[in-house]
Amino acid sequence: MARERKEKSEFGAYLAQAISDAKMVQSDFYTAVGIKKPYFYDILTGKTNPPPRETLEKMLDVLEEKLPADDHRRSTFFNLAAKCRQEIPVDINDLIRDHPEQWDNIRRELTKMLGAQR
């Protein structure tokens, strides 16, 4: 009996394409990252949320062994992972959290930039 192919999540599709761009096979990728096959496929299909920041960083490190470092790839990676989790990207969250003295300025600028109303 043929197995049903599951659709990839938006993050999973991006990750699969990045692995392909790096000319890696998926098994080599998830082994290098240090995760198991079932967890990797759960990430691809969205059965589980994208992994925590440490694992995302390791994934990027493995990709960047084969591809040049790319700020756009890095931000897209964090953005799509956060979108799947319905969270703020971890790198943005860390910047905000690490600068509490700037929270009023951040709030003011975001309000101006996004047109938010109180």
Image (cartoon, rainbow, N blue to C red):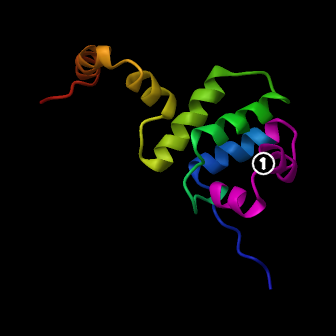
Q: Quadrant of residue 55?
A: top right
5 vs 23, left or right, is left
Dot 1: element? loop
Query: Which image quarter: residue 14?
Result: top right
The local crowd at label 1, few if under 14, some if 14 to 19, many if 20 or more residues have their Cα within 10 Å, is few
Q: Is residue 38 magenta?
A: yes
Magenta region, residue range: 20-43
Q: Is residue 35 left or right of residue 53?
A: right
**Kind of residue indicated by mark 1:** Gly
The residue at 42%/47% (across/down) is 86
- Residue 1 location (% of width, % of height): 80, 86
Tell me the residue at 58%/32% (across/down): 76
**Where residue 9 sits: x, y (%)?**
59, 54
What secondary structure do most residues of the magenta stretch adopt? Answer: helix
Q: Which residue is mark 1?
A: 34
On the image, the x and y values in percent for residue 7 come to 63, 62
Please state the horizontal and vertical placement of residue 66, each as a whole percent of the image: 85, 30
Quick check: 3 left or right of 12?
right
- 42 vs 99: above or below: below
Using the image as rendered, state which of residue 54 and residue 10 is in the foreground. 54
Q: Is residue 18 magenta?
A: no
Going 72% across and 37% down the picture, which residue do you hit? Answer: 58
Q: Is residue 88 above or below residue 103?
A: below
User: Residue drawn 65% across and 29% down?
Assistant: 73
State left or right for residue 6 relative to residue 88.
right
Tell me: residue 66, above or below residue 25: above
